[in-house]
Amino acid sequence: MLVAGLLSTVYWVAMLLGPGPVQTAAILGWGSFVAGSFLYIFRKGVYSRLAMRLQWPVAAAYLGTVTLATLFSMFVLPGDPGGGWAALAAAVAIMASAPLLWGAWRLLRAADVTG
């Protein structure tokens, strides 16, 4: 989930602020990452009870934040955003990724990898 949260933030920054070719690359990269993640998780059996318990609440929250980010990009963000808009777009990108980052934090905390 941590990698997904970080890549989601990169994806949204590219989609909100990048030119056309950067947006196309972001779409292709994100699609490849999602497909690869499914293969990795389900073919290798890489999941835990906590991950299975968190997947639906995290997915539902992520769907909500991604919907808000999409609406922001469609109806609020101007075509050529300046500095203030870029900062707001970065905040929206972080907000869209927040459920994934929260889920990763919960998994890492449960694994006690910090010592």
Image: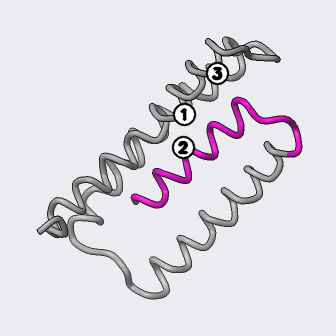
Amino acid type of the residue tagged 1 in the rendering: Ala
Mark earlier in primary sequence (1, 2): 2
* Residue behind mark 1: 93
Q: Which sits in the foreground, 70 or 114?
A: 114
Q: Position of residue 68 (x, y in %)?
A: 54, 25
Contact between labelled residues 2 and 3, with CB atoms less than 8 Å apart: no
Gap in Å between the C-alphas at discs 1 and 2?
Answer: 5 Å
For the C terminus, the image quarter is bottom left
Q: Which is nearer the N-term, disc 3 or disc 2?
A: 2
The answer to whether residue 1 is above or below residue 41 is above
Q: Which badge, 3 or 1, comes first in the chain's sequence? A: 3
> Circle 2 sits on which residue?
9
Is the N terminus in the top left, top right, bottom left or bottom right quadrant? bottom left
Compare residues 6 and 52 and report the one nearer the observer: 6
Q: Which residues are magenta?
A: 2-21
Look at mark 3 in the image and give the residue it sits on: 86
Prevailing secondary structure of the magenta residues: helix
Q: Residue at x 29, y 65 (%)?
A: 52
**CB atoms of marks 1 and 2 within 8 Å:** yes
Question: Badges 3 and 1: C-beta atoms under 8 Å apart?
Answer: no
Q: Position of residue 106 (x, y in %)?
A: 22, 54
Q: Residues within 10 Å of mark 3 (few under 14, many from 20)?
A: some
| Secondary element at tag 2 | helix
- Give the distance between the C-alpha atoms of the residues marked 3 and 1, in whole angstroms: 10 Å
Please report the residue visible at 63 percent of the width from the left and 37 percent of the height from the top.
Answer: 13
Residue found at x 72% / y 14%: 82
Residue drawn at 70 percent across, 40 percent down: 14
Dot 2 amino acid type: Thr
- Expressed as whole percent of the image width and height from the top left, the position of residue 5 reads 46, 51
